[in-house]
Every structure is written in C-alpha cells, then in structure tokens.
C-alpha cells in the first residue's frame, strides 16, 4: 500500500496514471519517441487533442489512458483522415489505440495508395493515352 498525498490530474480531470509513482520493483520501460514522420505527426496530434506535452507521450501509450475519450477519438479520426487524405474507420482507431500501431496502419494505407497510383500511371502509359 502506498500513500499518495496529492493525485496528479490531466487537464480533463482524469487521474494521470502515468504520473503516479511506480511502487513495483519492475524495471520501468524507457520512453519511446516517434521513429518516423507519421509517428511524429501523430504525437503532435495527440499533444494538441489531449493537451499533454509531447515529451510525455510514448508511442506505446494508450490514447484513452492519456485522457482521451470518445469525442476526442472522433476528432483524432477526422484529423488523421484529413491530414493524409485517408478513409480510416473509427473501429481501426479503437483497435489501434497507440501511436505505434496507428502509425503502422496509417503508413500501410499511404503505401497502398501510392502503389495504386503508380499502377494506374503505368497502365495509362502502357495504353499510350498519356
């Protein structure tokens, strides 16, 4: 049992679980920052939506555990889809609640779109209609 004299709160009034002292003897994991441009952009979006400094956002953190809620999740979906001209579904964000996994599906969607565009251009050139 640990006595906590003052609870850390997020701006939305929820308890900031990541700021609670760790009473276990486990080795705490090191913060993992963004590894690519997509993850960096997602960190910036989370910072804006959650009002959490980007230095406190780990790419493995769960959106809801950092203070997110359903309305912010919908705003995040809108921001991601607008920023990269994608059409991700809300279920994809729910299934990928951290930057690491959301970054992977975003990057994969961008790669698929790029391949389709290149294939379409190649088809036009092959037909001689360019």
Image (cartoon, grey):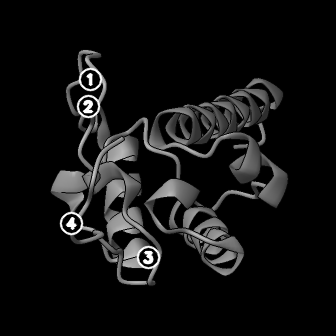
Q: Which residue is mark 2?
A: 32
The mark nearer the N terminus, 1 or 4, is 1
Label 2 vs label 1, nearer the camera: 1
Out of 119 and 2, give the one closest to the viewer.
2
Label 1 vs label 4, nearer the camera: 1
The mark nearer the N terminus, 4 or 2, is 2
**Mark 3 to mark 4 CA distance (whole Å):** 11 Å
- For residue 53, the mark is 4
Q: Which residue is mark 1?
A: 29
**Mark 2 to mark 1 CA distance (whole Å):** 9 Å
Out of 128 and 120, give the one closest to the viewer.
120
Instruction: Identify the residue at image location x=65%, y=66%.
Output: 77
Describe residue 58's horizontal placement relative to residue 93 as left or right: left
Instruction: Identify the residue at image location x=63%, y=72%.
Output: 69
Q: Are marks 2 and 1 in contact (CB under 8 Å)?
A: yes
> Residue 47, how many percent across, how many down?
32, 68
Q: Are marks 4 and 2 in contact (CB under 8 Å)?
A: no
Q: Residues within 10 Å of mark 3 (few under 14, many from 20)?
A: some
Out of 128 and 112, give the one closest to the viewer.
112
Q: Which residue is mark 3?
A: 49
**Mark 1 to mark 4 CA distance (whole Å):** 19 Å
Q: Is 94 above or below relative to 24?
A: below
Quadrant into which the C terminus falls? top right
Quadrant into which the N terminus falls? top left
Q: Secondary structure at mark 3?
A: helix
The mark nearer the N terminus, 1 or 3, is 1
> Residue 11, how many percent across, how many down?
35, 83
**Mark 4 to mark 2 CA distance (whole Å):** 14 Å
> Residue 92, how many percent across, how many down?
76, 47
Q: Are marks 3 and 4 in contact (CB under 8 Å)?
A: no
**Mark 1 to mark 3 CA distance (whole Å):** 25 Å
């Amino acid at each position: 049992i640990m006595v906590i004299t003052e609870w850390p709160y997020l701006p939305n009034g929820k308890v900031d679980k990541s700021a609670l002292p760790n009473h276990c003897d486990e080795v705490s994991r090191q913060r993992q920052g963004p590894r690519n441009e997509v993850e960096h952009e997602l960190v910036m979006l989370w910072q804006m939506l959650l009002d959490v400094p980007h230095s406190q956002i780990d790419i493995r953190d769960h959106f809801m555990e950092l203070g997110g809620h359903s309305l912010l999740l919908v705003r995040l979906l809108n921001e991601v889809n607008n920023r990269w001209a994608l059409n991700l579904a809300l279920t994809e964000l729910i299934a990928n609640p951290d930057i690491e996994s959301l970054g992977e599906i975003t990057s994969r969607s961008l790669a698929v779109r790029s391949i389709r565009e290149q294939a379409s251009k190649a088809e036009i050139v092959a037909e001689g209609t360019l």
